[in-house]
Structure formats: C-alpha cells, structure tokens
Image (cartoon, rainbow, N blue to C red):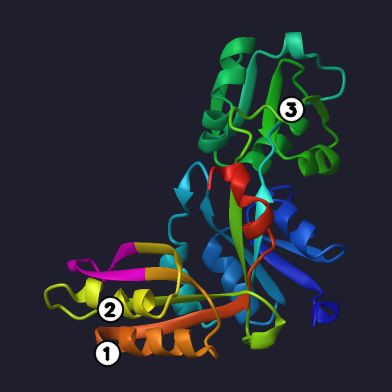
Amino acid sequence: MTDLIRLVAFQGQPGAYSDLACRAYFPGVATLPCPTFEDALAAVRDGEADRAMIPIENSLAGRVADVHHLMPKSGLHIVGEHFQRVNHQLLAPKGATLDGIRRARSHVQALGQCRGFLRAQGIEAVVDADTAGSARQVAEKGDLTEAAIASSLCADLYGLEILKADIEDAKHNTTRMLILARVAEVPDVAEGPCITSFVFRVRSVPAALYKALGGFATNGINLTKLESYMVGGNFVAAQFYADAEGHVDERSMRLALEELRFFSREVKVLGVYPANPFRQTGMADLGE
C-alpha cells in the first residue's frame, strides 16, 4: 500500500519537525505543508494528499491541543504511528560563529526545551510562531548575530549552518505522531501487536467511567493512554480519548468494547494499526 502514497500532509512550514517525521516514515515521498491541523486533515479527506502526519503528544509538553477534537470529526482513520525524536539545532547564516550569536528565534516550546543551553551561552530567546518559520526568517535576514532553533532539515532547506547540534536540555524529547488515511487499513490479527484508538462519552451516572473501563481490566487489556477533554462548551460532558493494546478481532478486546458501549453514550473506533517497534525498544529512554 505504501508504494501508492505520493503525498503526505502535515501542519507547519517546510522543515518543521512534522515534515521531518513524514520523510522518516515515508522515505522519498513528497510532503505538503499546511497552515493548520484541520487543513492537513482536509487535504487527505478531499483527495489532495494520501496521508496526514499529525502529532498527538510529546514526552515533555504533553498532548497537542485541538487534535483530539479534530480527529473524530475528520472522517479519517488512524493507520499507523511514528515516534519522532526531537533534536534541536542552532542554525545560523554561513559565516556566523557561536560566540557571535546574540539572539535565537524559535517556537516558545523549543526555546523552553533549550533554556539551559541559551542561558549558558548568554543568548537572548526570541519567540516566533514556529521553528521552521524562524529558520526561514534567519536565512532571509542574513544577520550573523541571529540564529534559529529548528530541525536539521531546516539547515538543508534554507541554506543555514548548524553552529551547535542537539542543544536540547532533555535528551529524551520525543513526539508521537499518528498517520491518518481516508480508508481504514486494519492489519490481520496475526501480523503482530496492534493499538486500537477510540473516543467515547460515558453516561451521566455515578461511577460511569469506572464501570465503562472495567471490561478492559477484567479482559486483561492494557490502556496506554486515557485523556478527557471538554466538548460542545459543556463543562459536565467530557469526552475521552484512549489507546489500548490489542486488536478489535481479539476476543478480549471485543468483550471490553462491548462493556464500554453498554456504559457509554457513544463509542467510536478511530483506528486499529500496528504498534510501532519504538514501544518496545525506545520507551526505556523516556523513563518508562
């Protein structure tokens, strides 16, 4: 199926970490920068792109805002996951030196993740809308006293030099990305470990969440992610997003979802997809 993928949409400017993730997961496939997450999802829904690569959570910053609201309404299906290591580079125009840098531009989170390095170097942090946009701006200005904090891909795209590599304070900074498509691609249950992602709303009764999730405990299903968020402007109507280890065709998962539906007003499976090997090989680096 991957040989039919010609274009992958992401939110951000060329060189963003989502762009880097697209190229890592789909080598040789063209990428489509989009202004917003909604635009990236719409590009797939409308047939402009074949896949969307959307960040859902970061090991330092937590969940990515808006994604939980947008995915259930998008009409798309989660068909894969990717864990992107975030390595921040100090980028500057050719001819600049580390000692000569006075200001570093980037997204507020990237600046915060490099706070220790910037303080040690005496570099002023300047907040911009995004990392790749900062790199583009630094390249266009050509000021040898100003740098950007962005990906290594930005150095290639905008003709910048890496004055200092991997300047992030936390060496486990990783973003989990979801790959979405117009058509579900449920793997065979025998192909290996899978993740089932779904959203649900419990009924308004005492201990509803406890009862709704009881089926996962009694059937030995591990929930790796469970988050609540408000919907419809109603402070008493929370919706939940969850990831569970297992496949919908397995009896244990089928029984757990049946019990969930009994105690819920609505349950929607967003995708069943292969568990990324990073879950086994890389989680130890995140302190799991």
Is residue 151 in view? Answer: yes
Q: Which mark is residue 114?
A: none
Write the residue at 24% across / 72% down: 209
Q: Which residues are magenta?
A: 228-240
Write the residue at 60% across / 46% down: 284
Q: Is residue 30 left or right of residue 78?
A: right
Tell me the residue that label 1 is attached to: 262
Q: Is residue 229 magenta?
A: yes
Amino acid at dot 1: Phe
Write the residue at 68% across / 29% down: 148
The reply to whether the C-beta atoms of the residues labelled 2 and 1 are less than 8 Å apart is: yes
> Residue 129 is drawn in which quadrant?
top right
Q: Earlier in the sequence, mark 3 or mark 2?
A: 3
Q: Nearer the viewer, mark 3 or mark 1?
A: 1
Give the answer, above or below, for where 256 lies relative to 213: below
Q: Secondary structure at mark 1?
A: helix
Tell me the residue that label 2 is attached to: 212
Q: Secondary structure at mark 3?
A: helix
**Label 3 CA crowd tier, 10 Å (few <14, some 14–19, many 20+):** few
| Label 3 – label 1 distance at C-alpha | 60 Å
Q: How far across and how far down the image is residue 152, in percent?
A: 78, 39
Amino acid at dot 2: Ala
Amino acid at dot 3: Lys
Q: Is residue 16 magenta?
A: no
Give 84 or 104, whichever is nearer the viewer.
84
> Residue 8 is drawn in which quadrant?
bottom right
